[in-house]
Image (cartoon, helix red, strand yellow):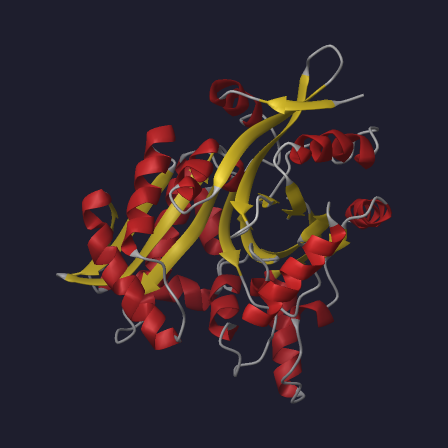
Amino acid sequence: MLKVALVNRKRYLTFIEDQPYRNFLQYPSWADLKTEWQWSSELLGWFTEDNRMVGCALVLYKKVPGLNKFLAYIPRGPIIDWYSDIPLEHWFAPLFNHFKQWNVFSVKMDPPLVKRKWNSETIMESMKDFHAHGLREKRLMDIRPDQIMNDVERIQKNLEKIGWKQNIVQDSFDTVQPQFVFRLNLAGKTIDQIFSEFHPHWQKKINQAEWEGVVVSRGTEQDIPEFYQLLVETAKLEGSQVRDISYFEKMYETLTAEYPNRINLYLARQGGQLLSASIAIRVRGHTWDLYSAKYMKSDPAASYLLRWKMIQDAYAHGDNIFDFRGIGTILSEKDPFYDLIRFKVGFNGEACEFMGEWDYPLVPMLHWAFYMYMKRRG
């Protein structure tokens, strides 16, 4: 039988560095960041009877106002061997027992497993076909996937059998972490091959930005205010919300403290004007384009060149994946996220659907009451 116990930071980092599903949301520095915003946290490990560590999870805890009860959240985790011969209930039973010490009433997780993929060519051809036939309300899910992971569907069914409930949503951004992301596979390719596989229009835009004198550089914490100003301007024009600048300052501080190259700020300027900027986060083998902003009154060519520079750096570090993060699924020009998916698809990667967000009600009545309250509030 497996047991769950607290793990010190050093042992946790040593273990997760070798795990295939490692991601920045499961690193201690992410917990350090969230602690500043009233989340408690723990680093947990799964151990065999001979004390061999076989899994890990960064768990965030949020206290319910006025009650000594907590919501437990495992972002893009846990990091376990989902395909092992160990039944899933043997992984989760000791975890639930541990949560009782925290008075946890509900557990939320979004496992790091991808269940379906669509490549860029498939998406672009389908979008052309939909538009040609006047089909304006089609979604990514209406396109036949290029790859279906049947084992992940089996895992979903097993989770349901032991009491987990999937949070079914309308679109990718209705969950804490986006359920659909776009990734570029860098493994086994030369950097010239990667560029040659971009859509010709994307190649043209990158070259255009260079001809026009756009320069992409890496910034420091001193450049965060300038990045933040552009982010706020972008959010206003898009009608979206943006966190306070202190969040980004703390993010830079905590992630850099864990590893100097964990976070990088990219800035694309033409003369003295900042045209595009993005925060990238990296763990070994994988870089994420996390937060981005652009000067809306200019030609968007700088944003293309900025991503190309980020991809080049990820390749130089030996990464296998450059992750553009979230995309919407509605393939209509009227949808606010349409330009986002169109922009990312041109880099010739894959749209990936994760297995989604799952909840486990340890105290069913309180779980129901809490989620009804959150639904009304939202």
Where residue 124 appears, as percent x and y from the top left, is 59, 70
Q: Is residue 129 left or right of residue 254?
A: right
Residue appearing at x 62%, y 76% in the figure: 127
Count of marks, rendered view:
0
The residue closer to the viewer here, 13 or 209, is 13
- In the image, residue 90 sits, relative to residue 321, either above or below, namely above
Say left or right for 244 vs 240: left
Tell which of 149 and 14 is nearer to you: 14
Farthest front residue in view: 66
Horizontal and vertical percent for residue 169? 67, 66
Residue furthest to the right: 161
- Residue 314 in sight from this viewpoint: no
- Residue beneath the point at 41% across and 36% down: 32
**Horizontal and vertical percent position of residue 281:** 41, 43
State the residue in front, 139 or 147: 139
List x then y, in percent, for residue 44: 60, 28
The C terminus is located in which quarter?
A: bottom right
Location of residue 80 with respect to 294 vertically, above or below = above
Q: Is residue 182 visible?
A: yes
Q: Which quadrant would residue 167 be assigned to in this image?
A: bottom right
- Residue furthest to the left in view is 272
Instruction: Quadrant for the N terminus, please.
Output: top right
For this view, does 336 lie left or right of residue 89?
Answer: left
Given the current orientation, which residue lies at the most extreme top position?
50
At 70% across and 32% down in the image, what residue appears? 95
Residue 358 lies left or right of residue 236; in this view the side is: right
